[in-house]
Image (cartoon, helix red, strand yellow):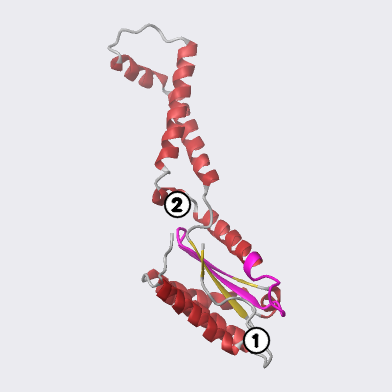
Amino acid sequence: MAYLTAEQHDIVSAAVAQAELETSGEIVTVLADRSDGYTDVALWWAVGASFTAMSVFALFPEFTLGKIDRLIGGWTHDWTMGEVLTIALGIGLAKFLGVLAIQMWQPFKFWLVPPAVKRSRVREAAVRHFKVGAERRTHGRTGVLLYLSMREHRAEIVADVSIAEKVPAEVWGEAMADMLAEIRQGRLAEGLAAGVRDVGKVLSEEFPRADDDVNELPDRLIEV
């Protein structure tokens, strides 16, 4: 899905172009709907719920079997071991499928993903996009990626080796703070533009623009 209009794309692209007037660094912006599908996390929740339900049945079988007796009118015989196992497996399967079905609702699915997993997957996705879109694609290896992942509500800044050697990761904190302050207010384009401007200031100090500098990477925002 597209989060920004053409006019909002232009705001970000203009910010990139303006920032690069003062530096030999190249800034790439990526806006992603999500960084991962988290299918493995959904399956783990479903498996956990399934085993929990079967464990509860194993600990308190009389409760469930009594419910079944009342449901079918009470005319039952003693349950055989095979029937009990069948009921246990049925409960486990129903719980597994039910939890998977609930997670079809994306907001709930993402709510269940542990924050540490989100952080890791967003970072991994940012690095992947950086490797494709910026790494080794500039003459001096001076590319920087601003990555925003909407579903996870997280952002990352990834710098190429020449920049990473001179600029500690903590320096990007101001850019991240300014970007997220706007984004929390629902101003995505303005947030990205603010982050770009802050990154540009850092780059202009460490990597000022040379007279023969050329624009090596597109200024446009990439939505994926």
Is 31 in the magenta? no
Is 133 in the magenta? yes
Q: Against 106, is 184 above or below?
A: below
Q: Which residue is mark 2?
A: 110
Is residue 179 visible from the viewing direction of this image?
yes
Give the CA distance from mark 2 to mark 1. Answer: 39 Å
Q: Position of residue 16 (x, y in %)?
A: 53, 80
Image point 51% across, 77% down: which residue? 175
Residue 9 versus residue 129: which sits nearer the camera? 9
Drawn side of residue 73 relative to residue 142, left or right = left
Q: Position of residue 78 (x, y in %)?
A: 40, 7
Q: Position of residue 13 (x, y in %)?
A: 50, 78
Residue 214 versus residue 209: which sits nearer the camera? 214
Q: What is the quadrant of residue 212 in the picture?
A: bottom right
Image point 48% across, 37% down: which residue? 46
Q: Against 87, is 7 above or below?
A: below
What is the three-letter code of the residue carrying label 1? Answer: Glu
What is the three-letter code of the residue carrying label 2? Answer: Phe
Is residue 56 visible from the viewing direction of this image?
no
Look at the numbered disc 1 and give the secondary structure of its residue.
helix
Q: The magenta stretch spans which residues?
A: 132-157
Q: Position of residue 74 (x, y in %)?
A: 29, 10
Look at the numbered disc 2 and give the secondary structure of its residue.
helix
Looking at the image, is mark 2 or mark 1 earlier in the sequence?
A: 2
Residue 72 versus residue 16: which sits nearer the camera? 16
Drawn side of residue 76 relative to residue 111, left or right = left
Q: Which residue is mark 1?
A: 206
Query: Residue 184 has which mark?
Result: none
